[in-house]
């Protein structure tokens, strides 16, 4: 049973916006850094954004800085990704993930043990 479930993906025109959600279940992720990754067809999974357990530290990939905003609500055990000014190159499957253990911080997929099933984001030109 997946402990993280993404939602909010879809088809949008370039310049549009989407808001992704990642809901945790079965355990609390309030002490875990959580991240967003994406994978385009034929490409490796890449880092998008990470947020620390209390939201005090946030990091973005250069390609999304100024356009994407990550946030979390530990009471709801949920993380969000607000995506604005979307570009066709943002197309891919977006995955949320939680770190291997509490307070671990990182941007590499190998540092995350809990993954959602992914949600498709398609940006048309």
Image (tube, helix red, strand yellow):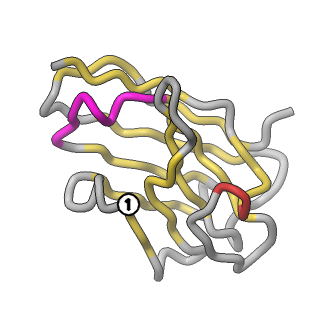
Q: Which residues are magenta?
A: 85-92
> Of residues 106 and 102, which is closer to you in this image?
106
Q: Where the C terminus falls, by quadrant?
A: top left
The answer to whether 118 appears left or right of 1 in the picture is: left
Question: Residue 31: where, in percent of width, then height?
Answer: 70, 73
Residue 38 lies, with reference to residue 123, above or below; the image says: below
Residue at x-position 69% and y-position 58%: 98
Residue at x-position 22% and y-position 53%: 67
> Of residues 80 and 61, which is closer to you in this image?
61
Residue at x-position 63% and y-position 69%: 33
Residue 91 lies within the magenta run: yes
Residue 22 sits in which quadrant? top right
SS category of the residue bearing label 1: loop
Residue 96 lies, with reference to residue 61, above or below; the image says: above
Residue 109 lies, with reference to residue 50, above or below; the image says: above
Residue on which the image places disc 1:
61
Residue 34 lies within the magenta run: no
Question: Residue 39: where, in percent of width, then height?
Answer: 52, 35
Residue at x-position 78% and y-position 43%: 3
The answer to whether 72 appears left or right of 3 in the picture is: left
Question: Residue 106: where, in percent of width, then height?
Answer: 61, 71
> Of residues 26 and 89, which is closer to you in this image?
89
Query: Label 1: how many residues lie within 10 Å, few (<14), some (14-19) or many (20+)?
Result: some
Question: Residue 55: where, in percent of width, then height?
Answer: 49, 74
């Amino acid at each position: 049973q997946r402990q993280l479930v993404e939602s909010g993906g879809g088809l949008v025109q370039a310049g549009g916006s989407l808001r992704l959600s990642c809901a945790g279940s079965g355990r609390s992720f309030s002490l875990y850094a959580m991240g967003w990754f994406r994978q385009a067809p034929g490409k490796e999974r890449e880092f998008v954004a990470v947020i620390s357990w209390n939201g005090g530290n946030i990091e973005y990939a250069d390609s999304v800085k100024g356009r994407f905003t990550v946030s979390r609500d530990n009471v709801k055990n949920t993380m969000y990704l607000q995506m604005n000014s979307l570009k066709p190159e943002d197309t891919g499957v977006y995955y949320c993930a939680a770190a291997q253990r509490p307070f671990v911080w990182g941007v590499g997929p190998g540092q995350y043990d809990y993954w959602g099933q992914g949600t498709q984001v398609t940006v048309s030109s």
